[in-house]
Image (cartoon, rainbow, N blue to C red):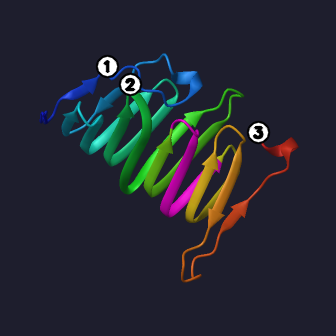
Amino acid sequence: MYRHHPDWIIASLLFLVFTTATASEPIDIEADQAEFDERSGTSFFQGDVQLQRGTLSITADKITLYRVNKRLERTVAEGHPARYTQKTPQGGEIRAEAEKIEYFATKEELHMTGKARLWHDKNRFSGERIIYHIRSDKVQADSNDSGKQRVHAIIYPDENNK
């Protein structure tokens, strides 16, 4: 069953796990509209969506949460652009923006497509597609199929990456 809640602040979506560090924190979501389908485990938010959980923040035109057994499997944020930010345990910051950002909870990966950009502290990456492996701190970037947009990276030596 779907419920529409225009102009409501949607809060208290508990038991969804974005990262180990924020697993016990409640999720606070604001949007112009929301739809919940408990049977399929999906929650859909549309219209200037703002999601906050601990140090994690996502803003987008729309966000869809996919859950299995009340545990988050995947989050899809779409916008022009969708934006993701999170503080790291070391005190740094991860920022990302793209037309589409998918977060895979079990793999702890961010997949960004469409004018993707990623900032890891001072380091910067851009391309048509970027995959960020959170656990291993690994970045993969691809250009578009036509080869017109190339991957671009600016990497600072560790001693200056503060």
Q: Residue 161 location in percent, x, y?
A: 78, 43
Q: Which residue in the structure is indicated by mark 2?
A: 27
**Circles 1 and 2: CB distance less than 8 Å?**
yes
Q: Earlier in the sequence, mark 1 or mark 3?
A: 1
Residue 134 is inside the magenta segment: no
Q: Residue at x 61, y 62 (%)?
A: 126
Q: Quadrant of the C terminus?
A: top right
Spatial CA distance of label 1 from label 2 is 6 Å
Q: Which residue is mark 1?
A: 12
Q: Earlier in the sequence, mark 2 or mark 3?
A: 2
Query: Vertically, is 80 above or below 53?
Result: below
Q: Secondary structure at mark 3?
A: loop
> Does any portion of residue 37 appear in the rendered image?
yes
Q: Which residue is mark 3?
A: 162
What residue is rendered at 19% in x and 37% in y? 35
Q: Secondary structure at mark 1?
A: loop
